[in-house]
């Protein structure tokens, strides 16, 4: 009889509960959060067997504790749960940044840090909340494991094996490389998409502009519908790497602006050509969850 | 017996031929271009009934002439075809910019400019070429009509009515407003997506970064797989409006960079929140063509 406590029961926490139950990794799930409405919905959906707003209550009988709150809130949650952990329980998380989250676990869990193993599933959706959770969210998706020397290899292996059994694929790397990679391919694009929609919404003819947007704009800005609190936290948590990438990007845009103003066709085409070749060379694992995701459909939920 | 000549037989030209034939607006299509292979494929696909690499040959018997080449090449095409136009023929185009294209028509067609009516269908796909053309590409999509005082209202109406019969929806506006709108919601996003993929591809760990990219990156950069020549031309053609938007955008990014470096949570959240609300409020017409378009699938073509 394995019991899992999930603290922060949103899209990721809820999908993890559904997926780990489906894979028979856990028999019972207790959902913990501060919004009773979400927790009730979680139970109605069958994602959780019970719920509580109390961290001690959630953690005291749990064999697996998952922290799935926004990353800047994690240190407090680790700290609040440390005293109630069973001696053989394993604690993991699903945060989008690694260096500061591991540091938060170290500070929050203190001597219980040996019970912690990290994990970052590369999956999600722009619409937050347990209502959008599905058991298939992690199928064939990467989960990044970033163990460090001070962690217990058995706990790390336990979490890696569990994700694999739940249908995901494990990639092991250092927390530093993780944060550099996702600053480039996830965090920066979110900042850029938010910035574009924010800018246009404040312009003259904003209504006409947004009303005429086509499929290119729809896909480019899909991630700008994501949770502001979650992405604010990611920007603060991975500040150094994001800031570095954003600076590089701004330099690139400055050069493109010059090329446009000088009608430098060659320079523009060289950039576009290189991007096109690299982009067309990419293959993405296409799950049912990803295909056709667009706000036109999402609105019917 | 209505004959249509399409000069530049790619994704848009080919889809227009298929769609206008399907709607019985035209009985016969002649494809014109400089790549024989594409033209042969167009005939094989049934998109064209015949083909030629000669503009005079294509135009001499045509009742409708469609110019569907990259926008910077349009003036020469208008100029090359002007002398061969039948007196009652109508000339239109499908370019993504309006002010410079209308000017190109005026300069290229000279006294035949009265036979011209403009049109910009808001539809496409990141993979260019007639191989991707479909008769449904314009279904329920906007076509922007930007008539000016010097144009013949009858020709303008003819083109607007034809697009409507072919399944599209007409929106009338000034060329200036068109160019401002699409600089914001189409041209700038393309520049931003190209810039991001180009930058990452030149970084340390480029392979690791691109290899770990998930669904957010996939959708954000889908348009970076678009034709470099087409988008180089659009940047040059709509230079003033794109340059203005890009400058505004760069200022916005500078402010966000400051907010990230200063851990200004409030400023970040305000931007993300406003963008999220605006983005979630948008509804896009979802055609089969748009849904689930991703490179994983496209590679099987």
Image (cartoon, coloured by chain):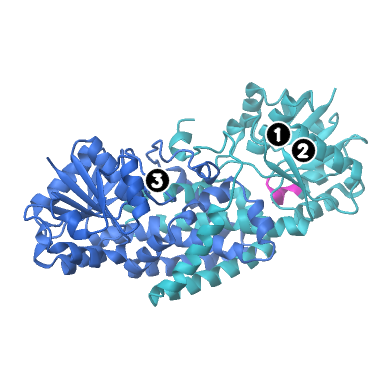
Chain colours: A cyan, B blue
Q: Is residue A34 above or below residue B228?
A: above
Look at the image and tell me in which quarter the N terminus of chain A lies. Answer: top right
Identify residue for label 3.
Answer: B131
Q: CA distance from mark 1 to mark 3?
A: 41 Å
Is disc 1 in contact with disc 2, using a CB cutoff of under 8 Å? yes
The answer to whether residue B137 shows anywhere in this view is no
Mark number displayed over residue A66 = 2
Q: Could you say which is closer to the camera, residue A193 or residue B34?
A: B34
The quarter holding residue B191 reads bottom left
Inter-mark Cα distance, 2 to 3 = 48 Å
* Label 3: which secondary element: helix
Q: Residue at x 64, y 42 (%)?
A: A123
Q: CA distance from mark 1 to mark 2?
A: 9 Å
Q: Residues within 10 Å of mark 3 (few under 14, many from 20)?
A: some
- How far from the left and from the top, in percent, is residue A276? 50, 58
Q: Going 45% across and 54% down the picture, which residue do you hit?
A: A197
The chief SS type of the magenta part is: helix
């Amino acid at each position: 009889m394995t019991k899992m406590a999930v603290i922060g029961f949103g899209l990721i926490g809820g999908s993890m509960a559904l997926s780990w139950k489906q894979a028979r990794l856990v028999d019972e799930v207790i959902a913990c959060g501060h919004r009773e409405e979400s927790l009730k919905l979680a139970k109605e959906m069958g994602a959780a067997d019970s719920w509580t707003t109390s961290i001690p209550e959630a953690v005291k009988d749990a064999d697996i504790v998952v922290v799935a709150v926004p990353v800047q809130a994690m240190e407090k949650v680790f700290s609040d749960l440390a005293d109630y952990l069973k001696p053989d329980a394993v604690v993991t998380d699903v945060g989008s940044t690694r260096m500061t989250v591991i540091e938060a676990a170290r500070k929050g869990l203190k001597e219980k840090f040996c019970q912690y193993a990290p994990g970052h599933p590369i999956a999600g959706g722009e619409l937050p909340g347990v209502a959008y959770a599905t058991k298939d969210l992690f199928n064939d998706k990467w989960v990044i494991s970033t163990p460090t020397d001070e962690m217990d290899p058995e706990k790390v292996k336990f979490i890696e094996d569990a994700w694999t059994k739940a249908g995901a694929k494990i990639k092991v790397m250092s927390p530093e490389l993780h944060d550099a990679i996702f600053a480039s391919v996830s965090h920066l694009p979110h900042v850029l998409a938010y910035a574009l929609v924010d800018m246009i919404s404040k312009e003259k003819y904003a209504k006409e502009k947004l009303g005429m947007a086509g499929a290119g704009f729809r896909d480019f800005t899909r991630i700008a519908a994501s949770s502001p609190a979650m992405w604010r936290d990611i920007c603060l948590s991975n500040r150094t790497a994001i800031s570095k990438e954003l600076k590089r990007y701004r330099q690139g845009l400055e050069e493109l602006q010059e090329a446009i103003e000088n009608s430098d066709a060659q320079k523009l085409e060289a950039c576009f050509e290189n991007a096109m070749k690299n982009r067309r060379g990419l293959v993405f694992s296409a799950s049912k969850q990803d295909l056709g995701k667009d706000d036109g459909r999402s609105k019917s939920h």
